[in-house]
Image (tube, rainbow, N blue to C red):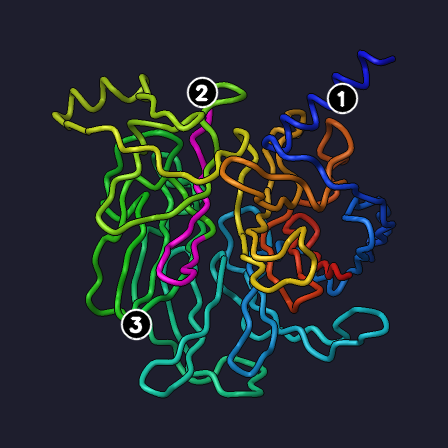
Amino acid sequence: MLRRWIAAVVFLFSFSGGSAQPALEPQQVSLANGKTFRLYIPKGYHVSVAANVANRLRFLAKSPDGQLFATDMYNRGDNKKGKVYLFENWDDKTKQFTTQTVFAENLHNPNQVMFYTDGGVHYIYIAETGKLSRFEYRAGDKKLRGAAQVLARFPDYGLDYKYGGWHLTRSLAQHNGKIYVSVGSSCNACIEKEEVRATIVEMNPDGTGRRTFATGVRNAVGIKWLGNQFWATFMGRDLLGPDKPEDLFGTVYTGRFYGWPYYFQYKEKIYPDKAMMDSAKTNHIAVPPPPPVAWVGFSAHTAPLGFDRFDGFNDPLLKDKFVVALHGSTTVSRHRGNSVVVVTGKNKYVEIVSGFLTGNNENDRHGRPCDVMMNDRNSFFVTDDKNGILYYIWK
């Protein structure tokens, strides 16, 4: 019995990145489709289903007038049925939005929207697979206003792309008068035919002055400027085994190469991707290894996506710390990710929301966390893009 207890403690300690796991308590969740399961959240917290769009609810954004928006990619295919939702009329008794307004529709895999004020005019920016557009936004708007200004175009070949077709999402960030877009690779590991792939690009708010900000970024789905530091989640490549490479979370600097497809990071060391070395030689590409830069190495295949820093949060467990959504491996039996974690230090993290995966089959997966947003000093939102759920968690 003692040996089992020790083994369990060692497993929990290693899974949580070397930090003590806080006590989590079960909370019953019931969805509109009849599913019921338990989510495990920190003691003293509560959870509600704040909204249910029943599709692929992705990233959150707040407008200048304080309204909550979210993207819906509809399904996992190369489709043009995506939407942008506006959640309205919060009921503080039920902890739910009583109104879900379709703000925009017929979009091609919209992953994220962002609000930005340019020249005194508020705009909503919409990132679809093939383009970045903006529309004028005024307080109280319930739908898109006027015609789109298309600021940039990106590879738009979807799942039928002749050499892979991976990574259909485009992510957004802003800082010091510039707009940033993350464009993932077209494949797992290859030499790209388009320079924009596996990069983060920078441009002016009107789309002019476009340049490459960083390269070798296989797929940075979560990107955000906090102060003068650019943070991102990095998705490592597949088919190198169950544990390598790690999925990463760290800072991005202009002009740097981040390794893909020639190198990967594991345990703060850089390793060559041997499967790509011959391709580099054949194409006469000399690629120096990048320095290890990630602040956190998550377990392989955990798939970190959206994140937020909980500045000024009341609970010391989360106060001034990064909270990250781990989307989880497509291979359910790996039991990687499918949770929300708080980063407690360099290469240290612990789960604060779990219970989304209870077995080895897809039917045992009750959700896939996508984005996290601090709401106020006592509450936050989490999106689930498997069932289209917006969770509200408060203390």
Q: Position of residue 83 (x, y in %)?
A: 56, 65
SS assignment at label 2: loop
Q: Identify the amino acid type marked 1.
A: Ala
For marks 2 and 1 on the same chain, the one whose residue lies earlier in the sequence: 1
Q: Position of residue 170 (x, y in %)?
A: 42, 55
Q: Nearer the viewer, mark 2 or mark 3?
A: 3
Q: Residue farthest to the left?
A: 284
Is residue 65 left or right of 42 when viewed as pictured? left
Is residue 162 left or right of 85 when viewed as pictured? left
SS assignment at label 3: loop
Instruction: From the image, tell me which residue sits under label 1.
Output: 8
* CA gap, disc 2 and disc 3: 40 Å
Q: Position of residue 5 (x, y in %)?
A: 81, 19
Is residue 321 depicted above or below 343 in this figure?
Answer: below
Q: Identify the amino acid type marked 3.
A: Gly
For marks 2 and 3 on the same chain, the one whose residue lies earlier in the sequence: 3
Instruction: From the image, tell me which residue sits under label 2.
Output: 240
Q: Position of residue 48 (x, y in %)?
A: 80, 60
